[in-house]
Structure formats: C-alpha cells, structure tokens
Image: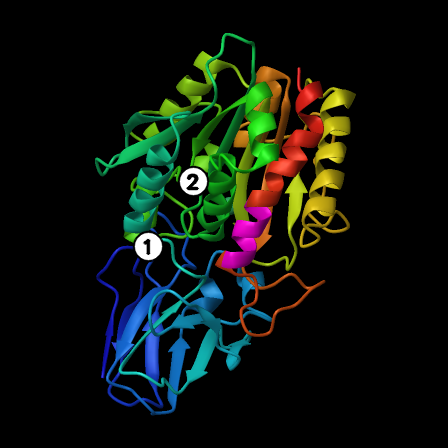
C-alpha cells in the first residue's frame, strides 16, 4: 500500500500507511505561509480493503468551517470525480476521516476535483486556437517561472467596446474557479452561440483563467510561491512577492475596466453567491444597481446561483482595498464583483453523488454570459 502526492497539484504528507484501517495523513502548508486545506493524493495497493484515512491536522486548517457536512472527492480515472459519503469531521480531535473501500488498484482523493496545470495548458491552447477573435498574451512570469496567460477575446472592428475582465483562481485550491472558466470560455468563443456573438459586438473580454499557476502546481490552498495571498495584494503588488497581480493590474490599467468578475470558491458556505464592492470610499449607487441586475439575470440563467445568502457587506468606507474587486471598483468606478462557489454542494439543490462539481461549475460559467449581456449596455 502506498500514498503519493509528488505530482501536479498534489499535497499530502503520509505519517502511517502500513495498516488500511489506520492511515494517518497531514496536509502540507502552503510554502512560506500558515495556510493549508487543499489535499490531493493517490492511494495504491488497497483494492477491496476498508481504508480509514485520517487527516490528523484538519483542525488547524485555514477554514475549519469547511469540514462539517463536507465529503471528500475521489476518482479512479482522474476524469469522473465522485463524493465519498463516509467523510466525517471530529471537531474535538480536529481530525477529518475518510472511510472508503477502493474498487480499483489506484484511487485519487482530493479536496475538490483537481485542475492541473497540464489541463490549464490544454484549455489555453484550445481557446487560443478556437477562434480568430482570440489573442493570447503572456502577461508576465510567476516566481517559479511559469507563464501568466491572458486571453483577449473580441472583434477589432473600430467600434468602441466595453472592457470586461474576468479572472479566476487567485486562490489556487479553489479549482472550481477554473472549471467555471472552461464553461465560460468555451461558450464565449462558440461561433454558433448567438448570445456570445452579440455580446462580442459590444464588449472585449480579457480573461486570466489561472492567476496563480505556482500555487496550483505546488498544491497550495491560498497562496503563491512566496506565500502571498494574491487577493490581498492589489493595492501594492511587489515584483518579488506578487508579480501575478503586478502584471495583470498593469494590463488592466492599459485597457481600462468597465466590468470585472473575480471567480473563487468558498470552503464553508454551501451556496453560489456574489460579493460586491460595498464599503469602497467612492461607491456609487449605479455600481450596486448594476450588481443587482447582474445577479437577477444570473439567477434566471442558472438557478444554482442565488442571492439570499452570502458574506456580510462591508460598512461604508470599510472595504479592504487590497482585494481585487474593491481595488478595481475604486480605481475604475465600474461594476466589479467576486463570485463564490461552494466546495460542498448547493444546499438548495443537492446532488448526493457529485456535490458541487466540475460540470455544475462549467454550466454556471456559461450562464455568466447571459448575466453580462443583461448589463453590458449600461456598463459605462
Ligand atoms: Zn478565494
């Protein structure tokens, strides 16, 4: 029996795996950081055995509220990910236990369906080759030397266009954000999709499918190679600490921004929701009105989205301007929002087999085009 995680996006430390009934694991911290919660590992040689896998440091993870009602995901073929029903959290002991009898010689377990950097490369290649309307730019390099891919999608017909920015995966363990991107990008470049075509008559899209390649490949939850939480770097990004934000911010300043959506996942709340730029010093009623119209259109396009639950709004003047959404809304005076998807499931429409999943993330991504279309005329 063997536990391994030395692969793209892998994360686990094996403390004991001699006895299938007593496998003890720890999640490795993000480099130069105290955050951890993402796990992804392979178990081999345990076919048909009742395995009890204890993640013994789960109680010290970044979001302990993420563990109650949580079920780990598993896969035999790394394509179809299913939930492991017998996942439980002992709050007093701080231990997450996954009980599973694998039906195959190899089984992968993870916090959420992984999205590897190889898959990212496939997505960028697919989209860049899909349409002459797509231009791929490398916005810069990460600290580990990876490319920061930036896709510009639009028609250069001399008519003025709204500048729409969509970014994902500042937090690399929130892999649902890049599954969302697959649905969003594939629909945007689909020449047979009438709504995408009409949207591209009015808007240009600038899309960063993965803001944090280093954290993604290293198997981090929340930070880049330097241990920086990129979504707290927007007011003062530094080349030695957060080049990802520095380069993308510079590209935004070149194009201007009329619309921004920053795509994330939330460990604890079992809902899809939007967090707006409440509390920025220059907040205008039109920013909030546009946000409400965007939300209403997204509910209509994809009922997995909802508006009843979410984060508390920041009080006037109390917004954290180091966060992407707040910095953009303050700097450009435009509609800027954070989209959160669940790690667990949508509690309003549960799927016992898959929970919140890559497929549902993709559908929500595709539906976001309807919601952008509902506000695009009024963005400036
Ligand atoms: Zn996040």
- The local crowd at label 2, few if under 14, some if 14 to 19, many if 20 or more residues have their Cα within 10 Å, is many
Identify the image quadrant of the N terminus.
bottom left
| Residue 357 vs residue 142, the one in the foreground | 357
Q: Nearer the viewer, mark 1 or mark 2?
A: 1
Which sits earlier in the primary sequence, circle 1 or circle 2? 1
Give the residue pinned by disc 2: 229
Q: Which residues are magenta?
A: 359-365
Image height of 96 relative to 35, above or below: below
Is residue 113 among the parts visible in the rendering? yes
Residue 153 image point, x, y percent: 45, 26
The vertical placement of 293 against 39, above or below, is: above
Q: Residue at x 75, y 47 (%)?
A: 307
Q: Does residue 311 show up?
A: no
User: Is residue 14 found inside the magenta-colored segment of the image?
Assistant: no
Determine whether label 1 and label 2 are within 8 Å by CB. no
Which residue occupies 43% across, 59% down? 37
Asked if residue 231 lies left or right of residue 101, the reply is right
In the visual, does 163 lie left or right of 306?
left
Quarter of the figure with residue 312? top right
Classify 138 as above or below 272: above
Residue at label 1?
A: 219
């Amino acid at each position: 029996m063997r536990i391994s995680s030395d692969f793209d996006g892998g994360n686990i430390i094996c403390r004991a795996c001699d006895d299938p009934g007593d496998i003890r694991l720890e999640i490795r911290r993000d480099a130069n950081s105290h955050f951890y919660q993402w796990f992804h590992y392979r178990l081999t040689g345990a076919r048909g055995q009742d395995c009890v896998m204890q993640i013994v440091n789960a109680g010290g993870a970044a979001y302990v509220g993420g563990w109650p009602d949580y079920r780990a995901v598993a896969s035999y073929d790394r394509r179809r990910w299913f939930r492991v029903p017998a996942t439980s959290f002992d709050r007093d002991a701080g231990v997450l236990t996954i009980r599973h009898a694998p039906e195959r010689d190899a089984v992968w377990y993870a916090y959420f369906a992984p999205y590897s950097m190889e898959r990212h490369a496939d997505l960028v290649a697919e989209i860049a080759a899909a349409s002459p309307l797509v231009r791929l730019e490398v916005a810069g390099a990460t600290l580990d030397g990876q490319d920061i891919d930036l896709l510009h999608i639009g028609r250069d017909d001399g008519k003025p266009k709204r500048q729409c920015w969509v970014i994902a995966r500042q937090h690399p363990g929130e892999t649902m954000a890049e599954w969302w991107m697959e649905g969003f990008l594939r629909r945007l470049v689909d020449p047979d999709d009438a709504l995408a075509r009409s949207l591209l008559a009015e808007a240009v899209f600038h899309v960063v499918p993965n803001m944090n390649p280093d954290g993604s490949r290293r198997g981090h939850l929340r930070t880049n190679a330097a241990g920086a939480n990129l979504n707290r770097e927007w007011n003062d990004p530094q080349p030695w600490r957060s080049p990802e934000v520095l380069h993308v911010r510079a590209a935004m300043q070149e194009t201007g921004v009329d619309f921004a959506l920053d795509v994330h996942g939330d460990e604890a709340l079992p809902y899809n929701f939007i967090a707006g730029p409440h509390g920025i010093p220059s907040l205008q009623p039109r920013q909030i009105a546009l946000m409400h119209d965007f939300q209403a259109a997204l509910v209509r396009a994809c009922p997995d989205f909802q508006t009843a639950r979410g984060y508390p709004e920041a009080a006037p003047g109390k917004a954290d301007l180091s966060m992407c959404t707040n910095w953009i809304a303050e700097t450009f005076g435009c509609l800027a929002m954070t989209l959160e998807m669940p790690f667990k499931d949508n509690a309003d429409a549960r799927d016992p087999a898959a929970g919140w999943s890559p497929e549902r993330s993709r559908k929500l991504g595709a539906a976001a085009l309807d919601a952008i279309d509902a506000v695009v005329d009024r963005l400036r």
